């Protein structure tokens, strides 16, 4: 469970990232040479084009990568591996 301080910091970081999206849209339009407001790029299209991911999603993905590498032996850490409780159905 995340603390209130962590949640606040996460929201602040994501707010900064979202504020950058209109600037990215402007720069992309400028590169195409067409600055008409009717051709503004929708936010979700910008997010997809730069592979924008929210912090929680990135953390979950990186946790999964780490656990996979730990379980497969790519990361050699017997101390950490002992802490993981595997549940194997019978």
Image (cartoon, rainbow, N blue to C red):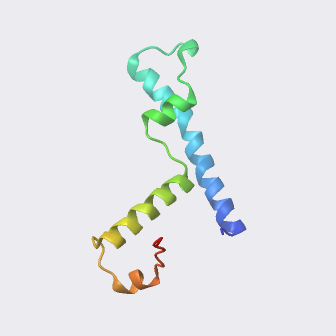
| Horizontal and vertical percent position of residue 41 | 52, 23
Residue appearing at x 44%, y 40% in the figure: 51
Q: Nearer the viewer, residue 59 or 31?
A: 59
Q: In the orientation shown, which residue stands out farthest toward the right? A: 4
Camera-nearest residue between 77 and 48: 77
Q: Where, by quadrant of the figure, is residue 49 drawn?
A: top left
- Point out the image quarter for the N terminus: bottom right
Q: Quadrant of residue 65?
A: bottom left
Q: Is residue 61 above or below residue 20?
A: below
Q: Residue at x 44, y 22 (%)?
A: 30
Q: In the rendered view, would you say 7 is above or below 42? A: below
| Place of residue 9 in the rendered image (x, y in percent of width and height, measured from the top left) | 64, 61
Q: Position of residue 85 (x, y in %)?
A: 48, 79
Q: Is residue 87 above or below residue 21?
A: below
Q: Residue at x 69, y 67 (%)?
A: 5
Figure label count: 0
Q: Residue furthest front?
A: 90
Residue 36: where, in percent of width, then height? 53, 13
Residue at horizontal 53 percent and vertical 15 percent from the top: 39
């Amino acid at each position: 469970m995340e603390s209130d301080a962590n949640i606040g910091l996460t929201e602040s970081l994501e707010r900064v990232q979202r504020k950058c999206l209109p600037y990215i849209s402007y720069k992309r339009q400028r590169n195409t040479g067409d600055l008409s407001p009717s051709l503004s790029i929708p936010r979700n299209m910008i997010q997809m084009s730069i592979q924008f991911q929210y912090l929680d999603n990135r953390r979950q993905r990186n946790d999964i990568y780490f656990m996979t590498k730990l379980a497969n032996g790519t990361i050699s850490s017997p101390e950490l591996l002992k802490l993981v409780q595997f549940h194997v159905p019978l």
